[in-house]
Amino acid sequence: MEEVDKILILALKQVGTELSEEVGSVKDFTSELIVEAVVRCIRVIDPGLGSPLPTSLPPGMSARFRVGMSLAQACQDIGYKGEIGYQTFLYSSETEIRSLLMFLVEKLPRENAEASDQPTGKSAILQRAIAAAIKAQLVEPWLPPNCRLPLHGETQSLGVMHSFHKQPLSLPYCIKDPGKKSLKEVKDYQRDFLPPVTAQLAHNATVAASLLEQHTAELSVAQEWYNEWNSQGLLSRLTPQDYRARKLTRLRKRIEEQLRSAALPPTESAFGGLGATSDLSDILQSFRGSAASAHTLTKGSHFTHSQKFTFTQETEAVPSPARRTDDNHHSQQEELASLQQQFQQLCSDVDQLTTELKHLSVTNAQVLDEFKQRERQNNELEEKIQLKKKTVDLLPDAENNIVKLQALVEASAQRVVNLASQWEKHRAPLIDEHRRLKEICSNQDMESSKKLSEIKVLHDKIRVSTEEAKKKEEIHKQLVTELESLPKDVSRAAYTQRILEIVSNIKKQKEEITKILSDTKQLQKEINGLTGKLDRTFAVTDELVFKDAKKDESVRKSYKYLAALHENCNQLIQTIEDTGTILREIRDLEEQIDTENSNKTVANLEKILEDYKAIRQENSALAAKVREG
Amino acid sequence: MAPPSLKMELSDSVQRGLRSLGDESVVDHATFPALVDVCFRSLLSAGRDAGLLEEPELKQVEGVLLKRIHAATTTFILEAVRQNADESTISSCLEDLSFSSERIEILYSCYQKHKKELERLLASIGKQPAHITDVSWRLQYHVKNGVVDKVNEPFYLISLNTENKGSPEDITFTCTMEQLQDMVGKLKDAAKSAEKASQM
């Protein structure tokens, strides 16, 4: 029974009953505890049925009675077949309560089994956590702002919110290339003047946002680089630095091309509004314009001076102020017109000059080219002249010289042949070596590509295994949390072992019972045999004696005795059997007495008496109230 | 509470900084607790004290390195709080960066001490709609107007008392009966779905 009680108490604790450590078995349950346990079980089994039931007994006796009645009704509604009534709860007996609790615990829904069947995974856990958080927040009552403590910050509306505002931070670890030495000044600045990151911004929410943002950016850059390197970088067979440099130059080239193509046709884009290209041409124009204006300032200064001089003279001659302003206006306009004209002229001059300049530069280049060509021709001619000079020098002693020359020619031919044979000699091994090296090269190429593919495979494997490891770690974590959430005092193995023990015990007992049964059967058989024998012997004796009895008086007497003996023996057997049944009955009754004793009948009766008194008191009090009222 | 994240990802620079923090030859025994404490405090009181790293206990570490460690540690702390990292996550992460168990213990105890405040700090980043705290209403009767002589419709004048960023604010509007019913139905729906979400 102890095992059963332990399991029951554990289950009740899971349901939410507050059981103290001292309660070790169903025997120790008080009425209050029983009521609470039963109500909690009913609430779990059928929330609709259990919610109106109170978890504790009310103080009034009649109210207690009603609670007991409704509880009994609820238990019957759930399907409890045993005997149940208000007395089960108020005047409890151990066996009844045990059977009731066993029934209820069996009826409890198997939450744990369902929970382990649920799809497991990160998202499920997260959703459960979200649900728990929402639940907690729903339970929390709203507090007016004045009553709020800082610890309510999570559930009540937060005081002041800051929007996610990120600002760049200057971090002291900008040594991207370990080989590149950072400047001494930069180091000095970082050591002496750069404030720590948290002191760089004014508000700590901004600091947190910026730090997180920075970190995420770094992480994503690393991730992107890793992906790109694995997909493309490895195939290019370059070191990471080279790969980066190549990418950089490619990008630069592309940008340059874009810029150039945008800058070339400015006339086309002039209609296209304010694109990047037109901006560029604007800038060029503005450069030209400023140059032109500078030109006018220096060139036309004399003219403007003289004009100003004449105009001022004129205005001085006129006294009326109104007139003067009019004149002024007029003169200014005139001046403006003349200046504009002049400006235009100058502009056209400049244009002309620039085209001329261009033309001249082109001709200059042409002339330079021609000059170079001429020089080359000149050199050739000089060489020719020298050759001719030498031949002319040789002419006076022609025959001798011819012989000499022929010898020379022959010698050189010999030398050429010599050299050719030497060259051949050298060439063969060189070609061989070249072939060999080529072969080696191709071999290495093949090997490297093989290795590359191996590396790729390895990379894939690494990725797969890291993913697997991550997954497994996740599962492990989850299982650990599940294990933690499971009740610790249930030792499954111990239970199974005990169950097995019990089963083996039962087997043993069964064997013994069958043994005893067979023994009994044998006895019965023997008894039957004996009775049969007895009957038969008696019948034979009876017949024999009866036959003789007709002839002899003394034998008749003995026959009478025989009959009497037989009857008496029968009576004796009957009596013995009766004694057996009575003994059995006595044992039954004793057992009954024991059970009654264990039901605390006396105590319960006393309690009932007390409760009866209490009810009477309540009734009389109520009656008195009624009378007063 | 929320499930523990499985692995914190840290960028190279942060890892380098943390490695120096865990290195006994860079940060010695006496300096370590002070440095960790400064990192936590600086996050909570940022922008006020530019000289926080100039305390006498931290003089032993070289200036640039100290700033580097500080930046890395604060980032690590924020990431940990953001992911609601538990002890096993933090310790496994720091073990990978060759921290001794004693140092992990110190850092974790500090983390637990300041976690709530840091959570509040992170939670305060963002936007929140106004919180309805109370409502008052008035039933009015529209008898007629300049166009129609007999309108005879009831309408409600509703005033929602809301609270935003700790200061009260009123939202006032009128609605007809149907509109009010519609609104009440929607509010009920919202409450119901919130409840449903809590019973996963």
Image (tube, coloured by chain):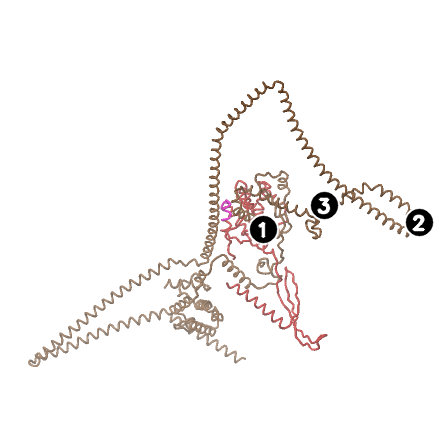
Chain colours: A brown, B red
Of pointers 1 and 3, the one earlier in the residue sequence: 1
Q: Amino acid at mark 1?
A: Leu
> Which residue position holds label 1?
A212
Of pointers 2 and 3, the one earlier in the residue sequence: 3
Q: Chain of mark 2?
A: A
Q: Give the x, y percent position of residue A175.
A: 58, 42
The crowding category of the residue bearing disc 3, from other C-alpha atoms within 10 Å (few below 14, some 14 to 19, many at least 20), is few
Per the image, label 1 sits on a secondary structure element best described as helix
Marks 1 and 3: same chain?
A: yes
Q: Main secondary structure of the magenta part?
A: helix
Q: Residue at x 66, y 65 (%)?
A: B170
The crowding category of the residue bearing disc 1, from other C-alpha atoms within 10 Å (few below 14, some 14 to 19, many at least 20), is some
How far apart marks 2 and 3 lie (CA) works out to: 48 Å
On screen, residue A276 versus residue A48, left or right, reads right
Q: Give the x, y percent position of residue A26.
A: 40, 65
In which quadrant of the rendered view does residue B125 lie? bottom right
Q: Amino acid at mark 2?
A: Pro
Residue A197, above or below A145:
above
Q: Which residues are magenta?
A: B92-101
In which quadrant of the rendered view does residue B28 lie? top right
Q: Amino acid at mark 3?
A: Leu
Of pointers 2 and 1, the one earlier in the residue sequence: 1
Per the image, label 3 sits on a secondary structure element best described as helix
Quarter of the image with the N terminus of chain A in it: bottom left
Q: Residue at x 46, y 48 (%)?
A: A461
The disc label shown at residue A319, or none: 2
Q: Are marks 2 and 3 in contact (CB under 8 Å)?
A: no
Marks 2 and 1: same chain?
A: yes
> Which residue position holds label 3?
A284
